[in-house]
């Protein structure tokens, strides 16, 4: 067993020393680590613990909640209130923001999707937790929605836990991206994927092709060109993946490149898109940029989107830089002609 590896806690302490500041990444991340270990355990026990199936309730988005959605949300809320770093939290599963009682000194805000990709829970396919950390705005004394409405560029840290064939925590504090694998025997995340970097070029795309009849022309053009392979304008064959778990898709892209699209289409545009800006798109965009990739809405950098509401949805295009830029150019060409 490789006990010469760096633990996530030691990695955070090193980062803190390197930055020389008084900010405590360890304090901010420690409770997230606990929460994700607990969720990993519950996901892993699955049917044995009676964790599969529906909870019989709906979240703010009108989506039916799974038992594990509710359990993961409760774990995140409980664990992250304990350390006192967070003055407030917001979750995909909660309509309103959650003020942390007794955390008057909390200087940060935590946003999370406690269990993303939950359509995969009952069929034992990878799911994950996504989190984004913001500073509590200067002088803010009331924890309300306005306090959370900050652009993605203002994130202090972001990451995800992937509950896959192994459990991993992938994290950025604005200084690259590092991946840690949970060693269940000792209950610690160990550094296994230092300096994760997305290759600039790729031959792999991910999109829910069942929605192709709703796509806008630039998205259709991009996918058609990929599918035309060697004989088409790209002059190379592309492969396709769709896990329907954004965490798993982003993890694959961080490991071997690729591009992921959940674009606005003629159906989902009524809601602004499918994925949520504050606790899905922004943290993933921060990670992807820190790994040398790019993340946009198709029409502008994701991290520059000015949020208007907590559960706002956005179109998402992220991954290998050259592909994301190409998709952006196709949108710009199309818009210029419109
Ligand atoms: P969720 O937060 O309700 O699980 O929804 C988000 C998920 C993403 O992980 C994934 O990319 C997408 O929804 C899959 O959507 P679809 O069911 O259209 O394939
Ligand atoms: Mg989600």
Image (cartoon, helix red, strand yellow):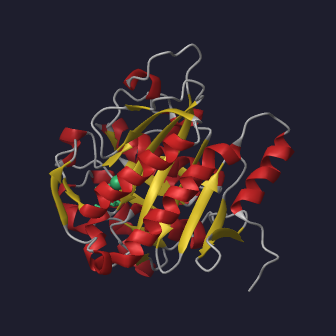
Q: At 79% from the left edge and 33% from the top edge, which residue is drawn?
A: 22
Residue 122, by quadrant, is bottom left
Whether residue 174 is visible here, answered yes or no, is: no
Residue 206 in the image, given as x and y percentages of width and height? 39, 67
Q: At 22% from the left edge and 62% from the top edge, which residue is drawn?
A: 212
Q: Residue furthest left?
A: 56
Q: Residue furthest front?
A: 102
Whether residue 38 is visible here, answered yes or no, is: yes
Residue 263 in the image, given as x and y percentages of width and height? 32, 52
**Along the viewing direction, whichever of 217 and 165 lies nearer the viewer:** 165
Q: Quadrant of ligand 2?
A: bottom left
Asked if residue 52 is positioned above or below residue 59 in the image, the reply reads below
Q: Is residue 226 left or right of residue 118?
A: right
Q: Quadrant of the N terminus?
A: bottom right
Residue 203 in the image, given as x and y percentages of width and height? 50, 74
Q: Residue furthest bottom?
A: 1
Residue 232 in the image, given as x and y percentages of width and height? 40, 74
Q: Is residue 311 left or right of residue 153?
A: left
**Along the viewing direction, whichever of 320 and 83 lies nearer the viewer:** 83
């Amino acid at each position: 067993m490789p006990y010469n590896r760096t633990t996530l806690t030691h990695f955070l302490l090193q980062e803190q020393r390197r930055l020389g500041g008084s900010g405590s990444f360890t304090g901010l991340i420690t409770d997230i680590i606990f929460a994700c270990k607990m969720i990993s355990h519950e996901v892993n026990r699955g049917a044995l613990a009676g964790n599969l199936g529906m909870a019989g309730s709906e979240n703010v988005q009108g989506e039916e909640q799974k038992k594990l959605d509710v359990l993961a949300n409760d774990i995140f809320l409980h664990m992250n209130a304990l350390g006192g770093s967070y003055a407030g939290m917001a979750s995909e599963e909660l309509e309103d923001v959650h003020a942390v009682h007794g955390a008057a000194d909390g200087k940060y805000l935590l946003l999370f999707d406690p269990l993303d990709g939950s359509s995969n829970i009952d069929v034992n396919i990878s799911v994950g937790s996504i989190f984004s950390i913001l500073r509590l705005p200067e002088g803010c004394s009331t924890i309300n929605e306005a306090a959370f409405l900050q652009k993605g560029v203002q994130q202090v840290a972001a990451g995800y836990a992937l509950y896959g064939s192994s459990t991993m925590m992938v994290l950025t504090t604005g200084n690259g991206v590092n991946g840690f694998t949970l060693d269940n025997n000792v209950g610690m995340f160990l550094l296994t994927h230092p300096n994760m970097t997305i290759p600039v070029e790729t031959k792999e795309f991910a999109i829910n092709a069942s929605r192709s009849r709703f796509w806008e022309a630039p998205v259709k053009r991009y996918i058609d060109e990929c599918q035309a392979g060697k004989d088409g304008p790209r002059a190379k064959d592309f492969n396709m993946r769709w896990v329907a778990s954004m965490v798993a898709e982003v993890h694959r892209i961080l490991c071997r490149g690729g591009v992921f699209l959940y674009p606005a289409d003629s159906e989902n545009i009524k809601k602004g898109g499918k994925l949520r800006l504050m606790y899905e798109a922004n943290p993933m965009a921060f990670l992807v940029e820190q790994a040398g990739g790019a993340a946009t809405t198709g029409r502008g950098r994701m991290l520059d989107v000015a949020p208007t509401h907590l559960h706002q949805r956005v179109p998402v295009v992220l991954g290998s830089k050259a592909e994301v830029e190409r998709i952006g150019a196709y949108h710009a060409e199309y818009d210029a002609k419109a």
